[in-house]
Amino acid sequence: MRPCRLTFTKLARALWNADQPRLARELVPQMEAAGIAPDAAFYRTQIAAAEDSHRYDEAEELFDEATKRGLTVRQPRRHGRRRRWF
């Protein structure tokens, strides 16, 4: 059985919950090797998990990565607040 996008998304969340963000971040190349492109839901899950872990810089990196891929995701919070653009 081959994993699908949902499998990778759930695995990413589980890795963040297990305090393994590096492994969660390494899923994208594995997804692409399996012929699965990460979607907005995958990135939204990773961003939310990073915020829940108070890793706001990583949440912003994930946001930037998603937008470079042309995906629409919300801006991450910055220390519990939404980032403001001036």
Image (tube, rainbow, N blue to C red):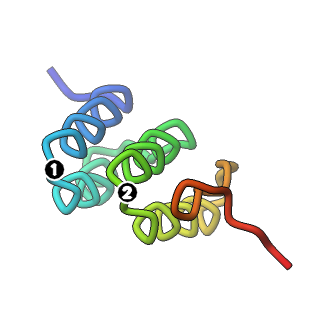
User: Between residues 39 and 21, which one lies in front from this camera angle?
Assistant: 21
Label 1 residue SS = loop
Residue furthest out toward the top: 1
Q: Is residue 16 left or right of residue 69?
A: left
Work out whether 63 lies above or below 2: below
Give the x, y percent position of residue 11: 23, 35
- Identify the mark at residue 64; answer none if there is no mark: none
Residue in the picture at 80% in, 73% down = 85
Q: Are marks 1 and 2 in contact (CB under 8 Å)?
A: no
Give the x, y percent position of residue 43: 48, 47
Q: Hey, what amino acid is under mark 1?
A: Asp
Cα–Cα span, label 1 and label 2: 11 Å
Residue in the picture at 45% in, 64% down = 56
- Please state which of the two labelled residues, at mark 1 or mark 2, is closer to the viewer: 2
Q: Is residue 65 left or right of residue 28?
A: right
Assign the C terminus to one quadrant of the image.
bottom right
Residue in the picture at 45% in, 41% down = 42
Residue furthest out toward the front: 80
Q: Hey, what amino acid is under mark 2?
A: His
Binning the other alpha carbons within 10 Å of mark 2 as few (below 14), some (14 to 19) or many (20 upward) gives: some
- Identify the mark at residue 54; answer none if there is no mark: 2
Q: Is residue 44 left or right of residue 86?
A: left
Give the x, y percent position of residue 16: 24, 45
User: Between residues 19 and 23, which one lies in front from this camera angle?
Assistant: 19
Residue in the picture at 44% in, 39% down = 45
Work out whether 72 lies above or below 13: below
Label 2 residue SS = loop
Q: Which residue is mark 1?
A: 19
Binning the other alpha carbons within 10 Å of mark 1 as few (below 14), some (14 to 19) or many (20 upward) gives: some
User: Between residues 81 and 34, which one lies in front from this camera angle?
Assistant: 81
Assign the N terminus to one quadrant of the image.
top left
